Amino acid sequence: MTIAETRQKVLSGETKLRDIVEHHIKEIEAKDGEINAFTSTYFEEALTQADDIQEKIDNGSAGKMAGVVMGIKDVICERGKNVTCASKMLENFESVYSATVIDRLRDEDAILLGRVNMDEFAMGSSTENSAFGPTKNPRNTDKVPGGSSGGSAAAVAAGMSMVTLGSDTGGSIRQPASYCGVVGLKPTYGRVSRYGLVAFASSFDCIGPFAHNVEDAARVLEVIAGFDERDNTSAHQEIDDYVGAVQNPNKKIKIGVPEEFFGEGLDEEIKEGIEDILSDLEADGAELVPIHLPHTKYGIATYYILATAEASSNLARYDGIRYGHRADKEEVLDELKKEEAALKEAFEIAEGDEQIELQQQLTKLDSALIRLYKKSRTEGFGAEVKRRIMLGTYVLSAGYYDAYYGKAQKVRRLIQEDYKKAFEKVDVIVSPTAPTTAFDLGSKMDDPIQMYLNDVYTITANLAGICGISVPAGTHSNGLPYGIQFMGDSFQESKILNAARLVELQTS
């Protein structure tokens, strides 16, 4: 059922809210042992909330989200709950405050069932980089669900949650939505407060919903969107009637079709399926406009320079001293003493240049504090996070900053200009969401370049700061779903919701 249908049944007394919560708890208990979408659950608390909100329903004071059962990506803070980012680094960290999106959902009486799995610190495209183990795709458990918000997508696709929240830095909502056959919405940067979202790349990160249908995504967005004085990047921008845009879609829209997104590397069956949808939309009154986004080819390189640079900076705070995983202090001191003793012993029997070299090694020995930093971070971070920290540190280093980071910022501006010019001619821009359907678990873990290329159609929207949505477009002959993506200009979420609803009506 949609949120509106569920809410109507609850408000009319046909269904009790506790029954809805118990149903989803049973689904999680039955399925999550195999799918591994949830990192933690709080069922008793959810049932208590259901009873409290039922009283509000009975006396007519319930909020907009009464009847909605949700999961939250484990990168969004909630007071009193563990926020792990699927990392050993934060495995025991308990948040002391709640994200703005959590407060807004709870204020409208949403019920949160638990926290969902993800790639560690949101770095990945498959939800295999998790300290809790990989999440599996409910459509085929031999496949990945996408990432980094794979747990969010899988929980909705498996019917374990009505809607979920994820985060999108380079496609981390839209790509898993495509792989799992659900709707995934990335709002404009600044549309939804990032307060309480653990940072990966601060100039890219966005919070957005996953849902079974476009209207449910619109309903969640109406609740979580809006200015937040605690986030100085949130926008003073009026919230549109997103649900109205879905319920009364305009068929006469201009759809930009960039040739750059329909070329080499795209699965032929996905290409044909999307072209068929566009032909149907055109027959119903839409206008298809060929456009060019010439700097798209630099998107992957630009993103992975800028995003890793920001990641390197943001993750520097995890030093094992103030909070997060800390290596065993005595073990660190013992290792340092043993190394120092070995060097001194070798020095006593060495001569000439060898003695000078050993003396230099002794001088350069790390302090105990530096050793503690290194060991804590080595133990706390996984391989992909370490890879991105090293990449980011490199591009920010002296001698390379201008050549890489500075130049990438200039290309980012060119990509933004490409979209700005395109939106002067069209309402939305269309593309595939991903070049293929979901791939096999483990098949790309040793090939990071191939893994990164899964985001080739989604990354530029984050570089430009615009909004995007993935909606199911069909089922491939291999039995797996694939999505179609619509991108809109800044704060034009109503337009992409409108276009996504038209596709939903076509494919239904």
Image (tube, rainbow, N blue to C red):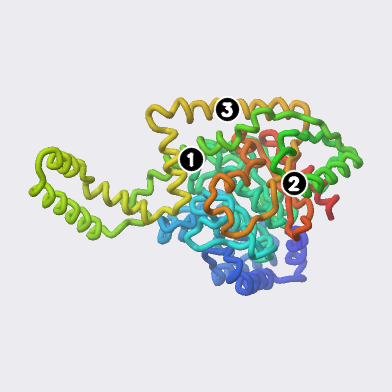
User: Is 134 on the left-hand or right-hand side of 468?
Assistant: left
**Amino acid type, callout 3:** Val
Q: What element carries label 3?
A: helix
Residue 83 placement (x, y as % from top left): 47, 57
Of residue 406 and residue 262, the one placed in the foreground of this image is 262
Q: Which residue lies furthest to the left in this view?
A: 348
| Residue at image point 45% right, 46% down | 387
Of residue 349 and residue 289, the one placed in the foreground of this image is 349
Residue picked out by circle 1: 308
User: Is 74 on the left-hand or right-hand side of 285?
Assistant: left
Q: Give whichever of discs 1 and 3 has the lower sequence position.
A: 1
Q: Give whichever of discs 2 and 1 has the lower sequence position.
A: 1
Of residue 356 and residue 487, the one placed in the foreground of this image is 356
Distance from label 2 to label 1 (Cα)?
27 Å
Residue 420 visible:
yes
- In the picture, the quarter occupied by the N terminus is bottom right
Q: Is mark 1 on a helix, strand or loop?
A: helix
Determine the image quadrant of residue 170.
top right
Distance from label 1 to label 3 (Cα)?
16 Å
User: Is 80 on the left-hand or right-hand side of 440?
Assistant: left
Residue 491 placement (x, y as % from top left): 67, 36
| Residue at image point 45% right, 25% down | 402
- Badge 1: few (under 14), some or many (20 or more) residues near its Cα, within 10 Å? many
Give the numbered dot on residue 484. Answer: 2
Residue picked out by circle 3: 411
Residue 425 placement (x, y as % from top left): 78, 27
**Amino acid type, callout 2:** Ile
Q: Give whichever of discs 2 and 3 has the lower sequence position.
A: 3
Determine the image quadrant of residue 452.
top right
Q: Is mark 2 on a helix, strand or loop?
A: strand
